Image (cartoon, rainbow, N blue to C red):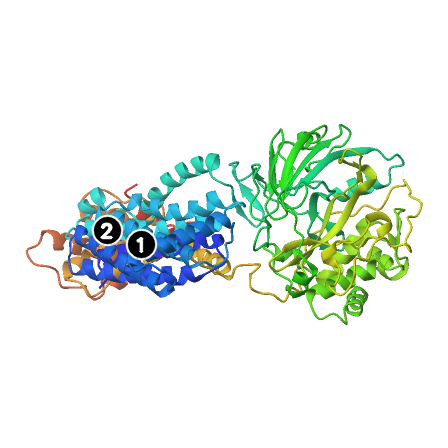
Amino acid sequence: MMRATDRSTVAVTIAVLLASLTIRPLTSDGRYLVLGWLLVLTLGLITLLLRRARLGPTAVFAIQVAVLGLALSMLTWSMNESTSATWYGGLAEQWQSGITHMQTQSSPMEPNDGVTLIFVTAVGIVMVLTDLLVGGVGRPGWAFAPPTALYLVPALGLTQDASIISFGLVAVGYLAILIADGLNANARWTRGLSLDSSETMGAAAPVVWRAAGYLAVPALIITVIASLVVPTLSVSGIGFGRGPGGNGPLQLGDPTLDLRRNLTQAAERPVIKYRSVTESNRQSGTYLRLTTLPQFGNAGWSPVQIQVTPGDRLGQIPGVTTEPAPRRQTSITVTDGFESEYLPAPYAPRSFNADGAWGFDPGALSILAMGSEDVRRRQVAGLSYSVESVDIAPTSEQLSLAAAGTPQDSAITTTVPDDLPQSLRDLTAEVTEDSSSAFERATAIQAFLRSGQFRYDTRPLPGSGYQALENFLLRDKRGYCEQFAGAMAMMARVAGIPSRVTIGFLPGDRNSDGTYTVTNHKMHAWPELYFSGYGWVRFEPTPASQAGSVPDWSVPPSAGNEGPDPTTVPSEQSTSGPNEPSAGPSQAPTDGPVDQTQAGSDPLQVVAGIGIGLLVLLVLAAPATLRIHRRTSRLSANQDDLDRVEGAWREIRDTMVDLGGRWPEGSPRQIGAGVADQLDRDQADGMTSVAILVERSRYARSAPDEQLDELPEITRTVRYGLAEPQSRWRRFLAFWLPRSLFRRL
């Protein structure tokens, strides 16, 4: 038989197991979950046995701490990387290693033994503290704090907003603790009491309402505080709150419209002037990025909703294992005539200094203005600011050995729509048929688009969507940078390389004083492809007449830099209105990258989501389940005669309450007569017989023995008579939300 201490220990174990999932986004290594769950289950089993042995709270806590220390020492020893001669020295070394790793990495961190040890330690401490609050000092209402501490680590530390699923895990675990406490209170309250007066004046607190009450008050307080100070909760692009995590998802304008408008303007005018200096004090030009278009479909390339992270220090460079050491310092001045929601900056920016309210997109490292749309558009005009960045410039030899990686947003950046024409798939296969690696496929596509058969031309082209791509690649073979970039990004995805289109500016023209001037005609689009260890790498498929030479790293090691392409000359530019693509929904991915070392959709989050859904259904079914359990216990034959009579009496009373009726007052005989008036003859006779049995059981010297075997059937008959005249809706509520459970409130 399960004891009260067993329920509490099991509930605490469940709560900590669920809470440990909330820190999963911080690391790509799931070892801490296996080790942490093993530690929690071990502590839970030991605690259950200790409490069954009736040890005091102090002794239980001391043994828990000892077991935790022993487990962590064994874990440190098993990692076998310590040079210290003592266990505590090895523990300190692993902790220092983990702390250093966390300081130099951003989420999700690469596997590290020290980080695993720190996470397992945190989970173990949360288990001990939560059990201390519930079983040691008897304060289950406070048990929300330790698991919430685990949730707050990623909520406050991640560059993106914490998922609402994480908060749900903590809430469900807390609810389990409160339900266990309610069941324990229910068992204590009615021990030895069976009369109407005892139940009316002091019935057991209903488990569900008690749990809801305990949960609602802290939840309201935490929600109010969280809305002001912690990052926004988000689920599938939907944001809640207005904390530092962002003002909810932001859908920005289509930057391709600005690109086309600037390229087709008749007058060429300066929009940006900058000076960019590397740590070697060498001044050079650089591409200036605005934003990326990761979503691809029949409507073309388009932006997606993003969660903006406030601040001027950007998070880890996506996909980069080791951040390049040399830093680039760029001072930029934007003219008054240029308006944009994005701040032009070299890739990859690490920090910036600009007046106004700014944030950044952690996935693209784009810097964006914050506030209303009108304010955002005007914030960059006339602005002078500085950006510190690093250059993502791997060698061609390095890229030739790298695999196509899996970015965090792979559900978007690896999508090849099902309805993509077969002609475009066949063309990609033809262009890359002699390529044996991801890098060779990328360079083959770039070389194909920069060959003399394609012409740079800003005049509007016929068709839209996939038809425009087919016209560009297979028929007309003319277009401007957006077509070249979009075509290469599309072909890269078909070839199994994650890709996106980036909008920004070419380096511009060098001035005599070492600065660079960028005009509106230098606005540009280029593709970025994702390689494992190097993240997003720029390629340049646009002909040399417009974009100059390709990046050094995008030329196979055996080939030289191709330099300007004499076969392609710009065509006459036109200012007539172009076809404008609109944003479309992403399609389900059909072809993804081969590298599966990082999951685009964490299976643990899927399992957690399913688990939460099931737990929500269980919570919704809890009132009906408790009511059925109570009825079964009351009408069970495995009780003494007095309990059987009182159980039947209480069951009839609760049925009337569940159906919205009012239980009469008075003696059992008076109550029986009042209820019998609402029933037909046979049912009324049954109610009268139950009332007489109750009266005799309470006041006679010996317990009644007649009609006891028929008592369950009589009770069911009376219950049926009470429910029959009620509406279906009333009977539905009586079953799923029985009011008798909540009588005390």
The one nearer the camera, 469 or 679, is 469
Left or right for 396, reference 468: left
Measure the alpha-carbon separation of dots 2 and 1.
Answer: 9 Å
Residue 634 is situated, as x and y percent measured from the top left of the image, at 24, 59
Point out the image quarter for the N terminus: bottom left
At label 2, which amino acid type do we have? Gly
Furthest residue in direction right, as rendered: 572
For this rendering, which residue is in front, 687 or 520?
Answer: 520
Badge 2 element? helix
Q: Amino acid at mark 1?
A: Val
Give the class, few, some or many, for how many residues have Cα within 10 Å of label 2's Cα (few <14, many ≥20). many
Report the residue marked by disc 2.
135
Q: Residue at x 81, y 41 (%)?
A: 522
User: Left or right: 451 with respect to 657?
Assistant: right
Q: Position of residue 496 (x, y in %)?
A: 68, 64
Q: Is residue 731 visible?
A: no
Seen from the viewer's position, the closer of residues 313 and 6 is 313
Q: Looking at the rendered structure, which numbered label has been put on residue 12?
A: 1
- Going 37% across and 40% down the picture, which residue do you hit? 218
Estimate the x, y position of residue 227 in percent, counting from the top left: 48, 36
Classify mark 1: residues with Cα within 10 Å, few (<14), some (14-19) or many (20+).
many
User: Is the residue under label 1 in contact with that under label 2 (CB below 8 Å)?
Assistant: yes
- Helix, strand or loop at label 1? It is helix
Q: In the image, 178: left or right of 202?
A: right
Query: Does residue 442 appear to the left or right of 8 in the view shown?
Result: right
